């Protein structure tokens, strides 16, 4: 079915993204995978191309266009290119809204221009060794010392953790803690007591630096409080729908691309003297995946359109996230199987799609959390 949510401007932007990927990303990606981190030059190149801060007001150097469909195009093309390591979606769609909606004018002037040029790379630090989806379990503390906050604790699984120049840290700012005793503090590169641990060794997305972060008596200036004191829970819940939509968009794009690759493979690969595509079982497998992708794409495009209009709610974002990522996982597994032994070789895109995509049902809220959100909305 022809898609109906994009205009000529969106498709022109798609061509810009593809050109950027071909020039600045694909030629270097294997090396980034070996290094376990992408080059900062790629971030600056993305800034020059206008791919950073698309929703940031023009007065701070951004594109001034909050239309989520541009972010969807970016996510789709990076997914098709097999390049999740350059985490522009994390920067633009997850962290960007915190800075544009919660930052003071002074904070915006200080941080947003670099955010848009790629000179300032960002991260958000929520997850702890003992607290993943459970925000009430956060143990990192920030004690009010009059003219500064004294931050202590640790975080793990932080995307952009090595490269980040600006980290939004979720910390307890009341002794009793709990979900409503949390605040957002911005910690900048070079702050005394802020240390990065190892670049974690993952099964996929090897070029995406994911790190442990440690805070030992870090003095965070009072002017680095982001949003309302003890208001982090509400701030986090407000922005999670967009994060989940970004993940869902990548999920269906990955499933469609893996299906496309596999459809071509079974046409070319022969067994027992004829192409695999002539076997009824193979045809049924392709038919099932194609139908599942088509149905999911229809729902996702509706969610993209609704989110661009500001009408998408948290429940439908959760539905999109869990359904699209679980579909991605199933399709990746079935496509790898259809490739046989070649599917297990990392030189084949389907193998990388299998390992790179496995995190999708976990980060941004696990599938189980998504179902809990949906179930609560229906059953109370």
Image (cartoon, rainbow, N blue to C red):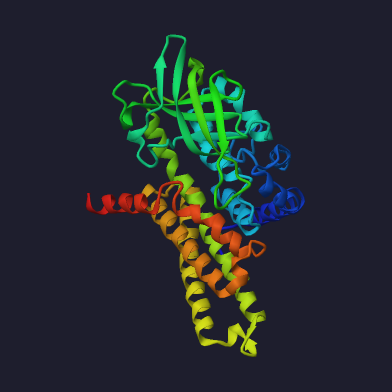
| In the depicted structure, whether residue 101 falls above or below residue 293 | above
Q: Residue furthest top?
A: 146
Please tell me which residue lies in front, 194 or 365.
194
Residue 129 location (% of width, % of height): 42, 37
Q: Residue furthest bottom?
A: 273
Q: Quadrant of residue 36 in the image?
A: top right
Give me the residue at 56% from left, 55% from top. Answer: 356
In this picture, residue 104 sits left or right of residue 8: left
Residue 139 location (% of width, % of height): 37, 29
Residue 164 location (% of width, % of height): 60, 33
Please tell me which residue lies in front, 311 or 223.
223
Q: Quadrant of residue 338 in the image?
A: bottom right
In this picture, residue 248 sits left or right of residue 176: right
Residue 334 location (% of width, % of height): 51, 70
Q: Quadrant of the N terminus?
A: bottom right
| In the depicted structure, whether residue 179 falls above or below residue 25 | above
Residue 305 visible? no
Give me the residue at 47% from left, 33% from top. Answer: 155
| In the depicted structure, whether residue 186 falls above or below residue 327 | above
């Amino acid at each position: 079915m022809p898609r109906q949510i994009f205009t000529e401007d969106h498709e022109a932007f798609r061509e810009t993204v593809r050109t950027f990927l071909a020039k600045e990303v694909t030629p270097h990606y294997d090396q980034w995978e070996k290094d376990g981190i992408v080059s900062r030059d790629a971030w600056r190149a993305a800034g020059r191309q206008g791919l950073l801060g698309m929703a940031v007001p023009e007065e701070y150097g951004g594109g001034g266009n909050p239309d989520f469909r541009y972010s969807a195009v970016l996510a789709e093309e990076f997914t098709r290119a097999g390049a999740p390591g350059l985490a522009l979606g994390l920067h633009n769609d997850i962290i960007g809204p915190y800075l544009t909606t919660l930052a003071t004018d002074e904070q915006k002037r200080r941080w947003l221009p670099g955010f848009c040029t790629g000179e300032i790379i960002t991260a958000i630090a929520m997850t702890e060794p003992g607290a993943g989806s459970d925000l009430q379990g956060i143990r990192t503390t920030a004690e009010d010392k009059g003219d500064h906050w004294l931050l202590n604790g640790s975080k793990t699984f932080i995307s952009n953790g090595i490269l980040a120049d600006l980290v939004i840290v979720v910390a307890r700012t009341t002794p009793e803690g709990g979900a409503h005793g949390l605040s957002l503090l911005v910690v900048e590169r070079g702050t005394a007591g802020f240390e990065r641990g190892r670049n974690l060794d993952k099964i996929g997305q090897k070029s995406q630096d994911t790190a442990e972060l440690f805070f030992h008596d870090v003095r965070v200036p009072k002017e680095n409080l982001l949003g309302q004191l003890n208001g982090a829970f509400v701030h986090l819940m407000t922005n999670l729908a967009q994060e989940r939509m970004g993940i869902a968009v990548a999920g269906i794009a990955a499933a469609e691309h893996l299906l496309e690759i596999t459809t071509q493979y079974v046409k070319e690969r022969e067994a027992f003297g004829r192409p695999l595509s002539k076997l009824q079982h193979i045809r049924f497998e392709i038919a099932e995946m194609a139908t599942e992708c088509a149905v999911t794409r229809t729902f996702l495009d509706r969610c993209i359109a609704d989110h661009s209009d500001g009408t998408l709610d948290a429940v439908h974002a959760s539905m999109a996230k869990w359904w699209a990522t679980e579909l991605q996982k199933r399709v990746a597994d079935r496509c790898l199987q259809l490739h046989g032994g070649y599917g297990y070789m990392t030189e084949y895109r389907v193998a990388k799609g299998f390992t790179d995509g496995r995190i999708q049902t976990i980060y941004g809220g696990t599938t189980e959390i998504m179902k809990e959100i949906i179930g609560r909305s229906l059953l109370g």
